[in-house]
Image (cartoon, rainbow, N blue to C red):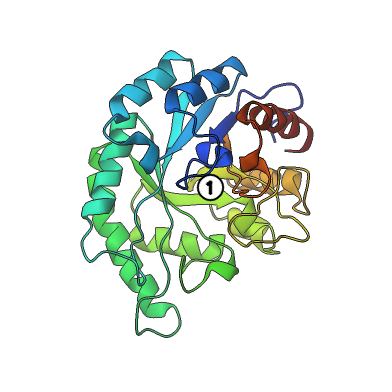
Amino acid sequence: MRDFTNDHSALALNTASLGHNLDGAGAGWSPERVIDACAARGYGGIVFWRREIGKRAIEIGNRVRAAGMQVVGLCRTPYLVGRDAPDQDDGARASIDMAADLGAKVLTIVTGGTDPGRKGLAETQKRLTDRVAALAPFAADRGVSLALEPLNPMFGGNRTCLFTVAEALELCHTIAAPNVGIAVDVYHVWWDTRLAASLSAARGRVLGYHLCDWLEDTSHMLLDRGMMGDGVADLLAIRRAVEDRAGYAGLCEVEIFSAEDWWKRDPNEVLDVIVDRFRRYC
């Protein structure tokens, strides 16, 4: 496992940590200001959300690289299944094109919940498998990998039909496309006592690792994530499994949804605290 106590070059910011994934949240910094602030602090990369990019993907991607960082990924496709999923894949394909223009090698997929009228997960997961399999060659042609992100079970029904790394890997194996893998997010997997064993079967499939913490007394299931070190997740044990068992050696992406705490703070403070906590706890 890598030692980050004196080195944070593997640290990446997901701009959701500044509130940029929701209208009216955070301080409203432009992508340029975020890029400059991260570069000044020695971050290794940034992950953007589609809503920030608009038609400026090439320009923003070039600016990140000129600042000495990577565009680590893009969040996210529209839902592929569930009540809010479109019938066509146009939005997902546009997301892939945006990731390619940014120079982002990974596009995250949050699947969406169970399909209307369906009970259980089997039929929805089958349709998800078909849709991801159809998107994989399109993404591969553009140099983009697709990262299926399992979510905490509390998001079942409306946001996800994948709850564990094991389930996400099963889909990857069924699809059998080299550019389809998984994203491991501490917030969503910290509770899984079989996580380490599942990651032993994930070598070469982990495309992203997302950091935050689970607060013991969380007040909102979506918008009250903790800063690393403030919660109950065993961050070092999770990263050890991600790296030593699954072979992940990429950047570590801090993604903190925190409407009543971190999004209300000066982004400069947030960025500084992230560096400190990454070195101390992650």
Q: Position of residue 164 (x, y in %)?
A: 56, 64
Q: Quadrant of the C terminus?
A: top right
Question: Could you tell me which secondary element the residue under label 1 belongs to?
Answer: loop
Q: Is residue 123 left or right of residue 196?
A: left
- Residue 53: image x %, image y %? 35, 35
Q: Nearer the viewer, residue 153 or 244?
A: 153
The relative height of residue 35 versus residue 108 in the rendered view (above or below) is above
Q: Nearer the viewer, residue 167 or 27?
A: 27
On the image, the x and y values in percent for residue 180 come to: 38, 50
Above or below residue 43? Residue 152 is below
- At 74% from the left edge and 55% from the top edge, which residue is drawn? 215
Give me the residue at 78% from left, 59% from top.
216
Q: Is residue 110 left or right of residue 116?
A: right
Residue nearest the viewer, comparing 215 with 162: 215
For residue 151, what is the image quadrant? bottom right
Indicate left or right for 152 with 55 as reference: right
Question: Which residue is labeled 1 in the image?
Answer: 203
Q: Identity of the amino acid at label 1?
A: Arg
